[in-house]
Image (cartoon, helix red, strand yellow):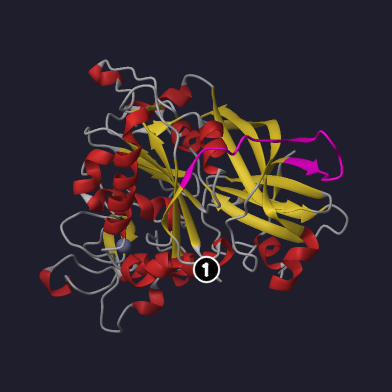
Amino acid sequence: MKQILIVLIFLTSSLTYAQFDNFFEKSTLRMDYNHSGNFDSENYAFTCFKKEPFWGGSFKNLLEDFEYGKYFLKVTDAKTGNLLYSRGYGSLFHEWSTTDEAKEITKSFEETVVMPFPNKKIIITLYSRNRQMIFEEKFNIGFDPEKTGYYTKNDHSAPVIEIQKSGPPETNVDIVILPEGYTDSELGKFVSDCQTLMKQLFSYQPFTDLQNKFNTYAVWTPSQEPGSDDPNGKKEVNSAFNSSFNTLYSDRYCMTLSHHKVRDFAANAPYDQIYILVNTDKYGGGAIYNFYSVSVSGNLSSPKVFIHEFGHAFAGLADEYAYEDSFENMYEKGVEPWEPNITTMVNFDKKWKKIIEKDIPVPTPATKEYTDKHGVFEGAGYLMKGVYRPKQDCLMRSFKGDLFCKVCSKAIEDMVRFYGE
Ligand SMILES: [Zn+2]
């Protein structure tokens, strides 16, 4: 049943800190499902519920009002219908569904949503944006914590190494790092790579100033063989999370389809963000908003790559670059994209309009005069025309400079605040 979700629904309920205990335990309810479909249709098939030992999220900010992401999760009280928890996210299925292959065949991908573990019966509803960016209801299911045998518990015996601890998980951003292609004897290298990764993340603003709002945990699970699958290099590796280069037929795009296994291991620690670190020198990686990030150990010497990728996964930032020959139909004319750092000018008031100085022309010419100014520069979101970015250069556009533009910085700061209150 298709049902259009009106924007108002996001404003109908708010939950205060004190109410967390009325509805939830300090652990996680996880729902695994398969997301299948093609270019113009999608289906959801429930797999299972799992109870995980930690809750990494805020006790206070349970409702996500950013409205980022292609998909949206809503948890409501089954009795009253009150909204208790919500979160936006993206997925590999969505990216694949925009490819030419999705016009030919139907495919299925593993996905998971997590929420604090309820102490009352709840309804879980999943939404997907249509081309006009309106959320449509796609799937719903009830969950009753009283029903025995309805959920399973995982094995959570993988060793956890604390890389950085700033405070309790509910008032900090919790990153869990998983090792991919590190063999039995490489625990030391994995921990050292995690430390390097975090040190470099915190050497760039706004992360430097926000470092004491992050916890980082490394969960150890060795792989049989080092590295990652590389179909173009005719290399197949027996690794913990079955990651592969050439994901979606893009050589440097290194992702894993084993999403449920990723979640199994991530649950050994409290987490808000999952990071998979691949032990290889081949350049690559990838990241999707509230899904997971992948970086390779060979990238550790080029930190801007994974800082850029983390911008996607953590703060929902869009790419601010454009291709000369891009004909991709990524952003619909007449529709405002959800990402905070690009605009089609359809609803620019909602974006960064208020930070632009009075004498800056809109759109803003990409000339020397405006190099350091914030404005509205044409060319972003892979398109040369019709999509605009806040600054001529930013870490979401190129690696020439060392800075995020003000809009991207603010989006990161807002997200840290959201998890950190
Ligand atoms: Zn930016």
Q: The magenta stretch spans which residues?
A: 140-160
Most prominent secondary structure in the magenta stretch?
Answer: loop
Residue in front for this viewpoint, 315 or 95: 315
Q: Quadrant of the C terminus?
A: bottom right
Q: Quadrant of the N terminus?
A: top right
x, y percent for residue 368: 11, 70
Q: Quadrant of ligand 1?
A: bottom left
| Quadrant in the rendering for residue 286 | top left
Whether the magenta-drawn stretch holds residue 154 is answered as yes
Q: Which amino acid type corresponds to the residue marked 1 in the rendered image? A: Gly
Residue in front for this viewpoint, 285 or 261: 261
- Judging by the rendered image, the residue that carries numbered circle 1 is 420
Task: Establish if 91 lies above or below 391.
Answer: above
Residue 40 in sight? no
Q: Which residue corresponds to the image point at 39% horizontal and 59% vertical from the top-left?
A: 344
Q: Which residue corresponds to the image point at 55% horizontal and 39% vertical from the top-left?
A: 263
Q: Which residue corresponds to the image point at 19% horizontal and 47% vertical from the top-left?
A: 301
x, y percent for residue 137: 69, 45
Q: Which residue corresponds to the image point at 49% horizontal and 44% vertical from the top-left?
A: 291
